[in-house]
Amino acid sequence: MPVGTLATVKGVPQDVLEELGAEIILSNTYHLYLRPGVEQVRKLGGLHSFMSWPQAILTDSGGFQVFSLNDLRKVTEEGVTFRSHLDGSAHFFSPESAMQAQIGLGADIVMAFDECTEYPADEARARASMELTLRWAERSKRYFEEHKQEVPWTNATLISSHARTGFLARSGEHGPPVGVETPPVGCNPAPIQAEATQALFGIVQGGMDPALRKESAERTVEIDFPGYAVGGLSVGEPRHVTREIVEATLEHLPADKPRYLMGVGTPEEIVEYANLGVDMMDCVLPTRAARHGLLFTSEGKISIKQAHYAGDSGPLDPNCGCRVCRRYSRAYLRHLYASNEVLAQVLNTIHNLSFYLDTMRAVRHSISLGK
Ligand SMILES: [Zn+2]
């Protein structure tokens, strides 16, 4: 999943994301809650309508940002008090308010509110944090079940957005978003009754202790969600530990439901995790690295800022068919980056996303061949 923190994958228009074959993107509840605000997005028909993205969206719970961007946070049983990184104002997230925010934003997949255990954490701390996340998972699910009909999809704005993008005309190709029925063509659509609702996923924590991870996975599965995420990894631990914990966790999560590994990884790592049985991943790496001139290619990583590319008339990646590699030379991309041109960030991001999405297409192809 490409990361579109503020309802935008930085530098890439939505039609280009579609051309790249992105089928789902991730947006961040914490950032959207602060700006432009959940109520604003809800009134505009939810994220799909607001950002003109008719394909799938997943929102995180806001928990990770609250824990990673806020040194002054205060955690209690009830929830987390934190300060905005924008203006220092005080805010409070609880399982209930995080669910309320995600229902208002209207993504297809929403996440339970969890505590991302810091690294390193001793066993007592990891257990206490895991127990808190389990109690918060119960509360997240209870609030979600009581309020899941309140999705903004009931607004007719979503339909007009789809009509504008021509999405409904080709809905046979992709299928409409969850909960949206296709209205009769030419009719003034009545508000849609959202029969299907969002999917709430649970999150496994437990620090770097395989036994705690097993317990967290089993007890989260007992609460019963339509999909499960492995959280609290890529928080500073060595890579071999990440892999061990992923392996130790996955075997306790049902293989017939989506298994989502949060916040990874390099192209090599996403292949490795897919091989272990992970179905979904998100990472800022392809987009963030692109903006810093770091490009992933079939021949390895390239830092396009290096002077030796100044006269290189070859494509960025001779094995990539993306619109950037088809059209521009390494010399031109190096010039754009060195000149701090906006187009450098746009083109670099498009290529990196293309490389990641191609990588996952290759993974799916291998799976379909039984390899
Ligand atoms: Zn390319």
Image: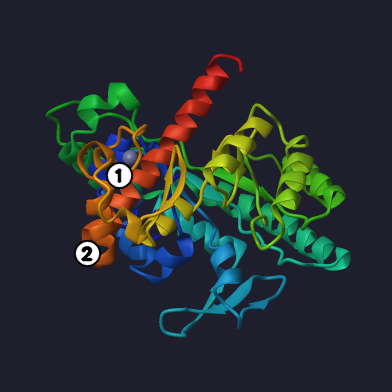
Q: Nearer the viewer, mark 2 or mark 1?
A: 2
Task: Tell which quarter ligand 1 is in.
Answer: top left
Please give left or right for residue 135 compared with residue 160 in the image: right
The residue beneath circle 1 is 53
Q: Is residue 371 above or below residue 213?
A: above
Q: Residue drawn 74% across and 58% down?
A: 135
The residue beneath circle 2 is 341
Task: Give whichever of 223, 312 is nearer the camera.
Answer: 312
Residue behind label 1 places its C-beta within 8 angstroms of ligand 1: no
Residue behind label 2 places its C-beta within 8 angstroms of ligand 1: no
Q: Position of residue 69 (x, y in %)?
A: 54, 73
Q: Earlier in the sequence, mark 2 or mark 1?
A: 1
Q: Position of residue 9 (x, y in %)?
A: 35, 53
Give the amino acid at mark 1.
Trp
Circle 2 SS class:
loop
Question: Which residue is outermost to the left?
Answer: 186
